[in-house]
Image: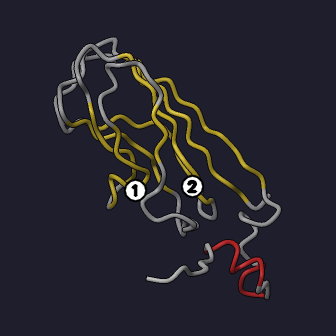
Amino acid sequence: MAASTQYGANYAAARDAGPATLLRHAQWGGKVRNQRDVATLSSNSDIGSLIYVGKLRKGTLPLRVVIKGATSKAVTGTIGWAGSSAALGTFTTLATGLPQILFPTSPNTVLTEDKDIYITTTGANADADDVIVTDIEYATAD
């Protein structure tokens, strides 16, 4: 096997900038924003429960999610939206209290419609007063 040269999607778009790529303002000269949510559960939640933690608007580019929990059990899960519940990633147990960095399953994809962001719990039931903190980082054109 021989060595090769590879190019990332953003490098190629920047190198060959034209009308089609320059319209992707969220990637070129836009702003990076953060949406934080601290969810303190008001009741026990079975596996498969939804915990809404944000909303992303049409035209935004999801970059990453940092999630941290203080859960009494080994709650695991996904974060995403209707139709793609793991679009922003899958996390391991939150019981450790350590932050986890998740990346979108389809990077460099600008949203074509508003999305309500939620966590779907798996692995273990979550208890009342468990706390889950999410930071959703995204880019916008303005």
In this rendering, is residue 93 above or below 60?
A: above
**Residue drawn where x is 57% and y is 55% of the image:** 62
Q: In the picture, which quadrant includes the C terminus?
A: bottom right
Q: Is residue 66 left or right of residue 130?
A: right
User: Which residue is disc 2 drawn over?
Assistant: 62
The N terminus lies in quadrant: bottom left
Q: Amino acid at mark 2?
A: Pro
- At label 1, which amino acid type do we have? Ala
Task: Tell me the colour scheme of the image.
Answer: secondary structure
Front-most of 50 and 10? 10
Q: Residue at x 83, y 62 (%)?
A: 29
Which of these two is toward me, 23 or 52?
23
* Residue 81 vs residue 103, the one in the foreground: 103
What label does residue 87 carry, if any? 1
Q: Residue at x 23, y 24 (%)?
A: 74
Q: Give me the residue at 32% from left, 53% from top.
A: 85
Q: Position of residue 34 (x, y in %)?
A: 65, 40
Compared to 76, does 27 lie above or below? Answer: below
* Lateral position of residue 5 relative to residue 14, left or right: left
Residue extending furthest front?
1
Question: Residue 79 appears in which quarter of the rendering?
Answer: top left
How far across and down, in percent of the image, does residue 6 sit? 59, 78
View extreme (right): residue: 29
User: Left of 70 or right of it: where is 23?
Assistant: right
Mark 2 and mark 1 in contact (Cβ < 8 Å)? yes
Q: Earlier in the sequence, mark 1 or mark 2?
A: 2
Q: Residue 21's x, y, as percent?
A: 72, 81
